[in-house]
Image (cartoon, rainbow, N blue to C red):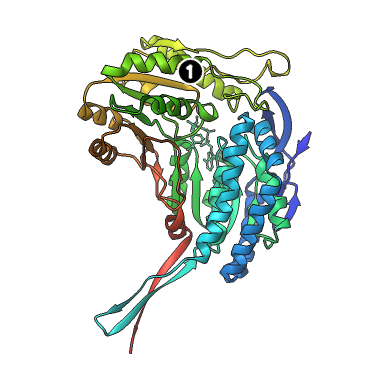
Amino acid sequence: MLVLQNFIGGEFLDAKVANFIDSYNPSTGKVYAKIPDSTEDDINFAVEAAHKAFTKWSKTHRSVRANIMYRIADILESRQKEFAEAEVRDQGKTITFATNIDINRSIYNFRYFAGYLLHMEEKASILDGRAFNYVKRTPSGVAGLISPWNLPLYLLTWKIAPCIAAGCACVCKPSEFTSVTAFMLCSVLKEAGLPDGVVNMVFGTGPNAGQALVAHPKVRLISFTGGTVSGLKVNTTASMHLKKVSLELGGKNANIIFEDCDFENAVTTSIKSSFSNQGEICLCGSRIFVQSSIYQKFLDAFVPKARDMIVGDPTDPQTEVGALISKSHMEKVLGYIELAKQEGGVIECGGGRKELKGELCDGYFVEPTVITNLKPSCRVAQEEIFGPVVTIHPFETEEEVINLANDSPYGLSCSVWSQNGSRMRRVAEAIDVGTVWVNCWLWRDLSMPFGGTKKSGVGREGGEYSMEFYTEQKTVCLAD
Ligand code: TXE
């Protein structure tokens, strides 16, 4: 049995109280690791270690910081297979997705922000020929980084990389469902020569370790990715201390398919945007709107592809859909499929748990499920399911579909499929979300702002936006 330890001040330590949380392999339903159920005492200790390290790290030359980050990326890359396999065991995702997306992007997160750091420039200006103004940027302090279970290492490193690039130190609280690759990362950080205490890892639950981190007075900023309900609690606690907060929350994203689209590409990519990572990505397009003239043609092409997806052993490179994160999450997803039936939905394919044999018989597998005949305003089409379930709805006009897409409490992302240039721009600009993909999905330039509107979050991260978050800017005005 794998037993994790916290990583504080460069040392692997047991939690102060020896309680553990069971961590399950989602594809077998069996416990395979024990996670420390850390408490406020562990958080306090880690924040002190981060605080101590911050004094020196914040003044370390940026080329030194960047070199260490490049080394972290190189070591991660040399252990890519091992990390991908660990992510599969811990999360239930497929080995193909873990290798190509999760671990690849984790490596790139460090390389991107190391490069960014070396090329940062500050603003300066002359005021009416009388005074010289410039911006002095300083790292904000100790950050609390709280990450979810759907893209464990990918989203954790999306926070750690800009944080340490900016010269901040941090205490991380990964999801209690998926802590293993975060634990493995600690040895990489050590080997790369990151000074002790710059990154600390405290494992445990949201209400215990997570809340203590958010409430700690010496933690100046919080970057959180997770569900909207938890995000609201985090925001409430953080606001009591006027902390800087970045919240990346849920999504219920529209995928809009116009009759003038590149049909093949729209169908193939929509399969990916619906079912990649078992639909457990906040950016998945779970509400598909198809123009009436091609509605039936779309269903005829999309449903068989969804039905034929290979659901099963996530370690097999052929597998396309792995296991959901937990039994309770699987039950939640299946509950939404039942609700869809009550709301008058027609199950075009899937609709249940995927029964597998042998070791996988207790795994949390759900068939890719396509539902039609639902009103876009019903609960199944409005609430975040976060599983391999999509609803498909016909629409007539551009104006109508813009209203339908915007009729959501969330505002994370949207996909639009059309080959009409002015329509692409018109629709993209009218949708109230943080990211719009036109004729593609999940393409990310890390220099672009990333975040959501409405219940999808607060703030933007990426390139200069992350640097703004992790630093304070002071204006210095020099007159003769
Ligand atoms: O995540 P939580 P949950 C959505 C998805 C899912 C729902 C709930 O719809 O079904 O959220 O998922 C920590 N103070 N997303 O409940 O609880 C927690 O320990 C401090 C969308 O499993 O939000 C973990 O580290 N921390 C999403 C992290 O928050 C707290 C990804 C996320 O867990 C806390 C995952 C608290 N009070 C789920 N409560 C996305 N945006 O990508 C929890 N945590």
Task: Give left or right: position of 334 versus 132.
Answer: right
The residue carrying pointer 1 sits among few (fewer than 14), some (14 to 19) or many (20 or more) residues within 10 Å by Cα, namely some
The picture quadrant where one finds residue 477 is bottom left
User: Considering depth in this image, is 276 or 223 the residue closer to the camera?
Assistant: 276
Please state the horizontal and vertical placement of residue 66, each as a whole percent of the image.
59, 63
Residue at the spot x=29%, y=26% of the render?
258
The picture quadrant where one finds residue 456 is top left
Q: Which element carries disc 1, helix, strand or loop?
A: helix
Task: Give left or right: position of 201 versus 294.
Answer: right
Please state the horizontal and vertical placement of residue 464, each as a whole percent of the image.
43, 58
- The amino acid pointed to by label 1 is Lys
* Residue that badge 1 annotates: 305
Image quadrant containing the C terminus: bottom left
The picture quadrant where one finds residue 178 is top right
Q: Is residue 218 visible?
A: no
Farthest residue in the right direction?
1
Task: Give left or right: position of 191 versus 153.
Answer: right
User: Where 477 falls versus 286 (above or below)?
Assistant: below
Please state the horizontal and vertical placement of residue 40, each as a whole percent of the image.
62, 48
Residue at the spot x=59%, y=68% of the render?
63
Image quadrant containing the N terminus: top right
Q: Is residue 1 visible?
A: yes
Residue at the spot x=47%, y=36% of the render?
227
User: Where 409 falls versus 447 (above or below)?
Assistant: above
User: Where 29 falls versus 142 (above or below)?
Assistant: above
User: Considering depth in this image, is 109 or 169 the residue closer to the camera?
Assistant: 109
Please state the horizontal and vertical placement of residue 472, each as a whole percent of the image.
44, 65
